Amino acid sequence: MTVTPPPTLATTTHGPKAMTSIEYTWARATLGTIFPAAPEAGITLGIVDMELAVFIDELASALPSLTWFGLRMFLIIIALSPLFIVGRFATMAGLGEADRDRVIGTIGHSNIYLVRQMVLALKATFAMFFAGGEELQAVCRGREPDRSKLVALGRKTAA
């Protein structure tokens, strides 16, 4: 009997299974705004250039169903929010880069705690996937931090 190893992020290319294709399009637009490429910093790939569908599928199967439901609802709510923020009947996928930035910024700075937390939950969840990318890892490992900009930690001396 031959045992086939499970697919990995690097070897699997398939469409989304944890969400509908329209939800996946919205997720790409939303997450692409949160985790864009930054060529000026040496990061030429954004989260949309990675195996996002595979990660979403793995995430959906690994998380408790209520947690996955919450993340999925956050993605849907943010995707539909341009109507209220930009004032146009469009989803995140139908907006330009500047309008998407405005939507994410407005939601992320809302006075309503739960609204603010939607963006934070997506950032926290997908940051590990984005930071695990080979290009970002290479950039991070290849740079020595500018120690002059670091804050010295230690005990305060009594005055």
Image (spheres, rainbow, N blue to C red):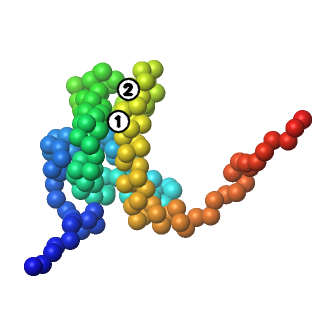
Mark 2, residue position: 115
Tell which residue pokes out farthest to the left in this image: 1
Tell me which corner region of the image, top left, top right, bottom left or bottom right, holds residue 4. Answer: bottom left
Where does the image place residue 41, in percent across and percent down from the top left?
51, 56
**Residue occupying the point 38% across, 58% down:** 45
Tell which residue pokes out farthest to the bottom in this image: 1
- Pick whichever of labels 2 and 1 is earlier in the sequence: 1
Q: Amino acid at mark 2?
A: Val
Mark 1, residue position: 100
Crowding at dot 2, Cα within 10 Å, few <14 / some 14-19 / many 20+, comes out as some
Observer-nearest of 103 and 60: 60
Left or right of residue 18: residue 133 = right
Q: Quadrant of the C terminus?
A: top right
Tell which residue pokes out farthest to the front in this image: 1
Where does the image place residue 135, in percent across and percent down from the top left?
42, 64
On residue 67, the disc is none
Tell me which corner region of the image, top left, top right, bottom left or bottom right, holds residue 155. Answer: top right
**Residue occupying the point 36% across, 32% down:** 118
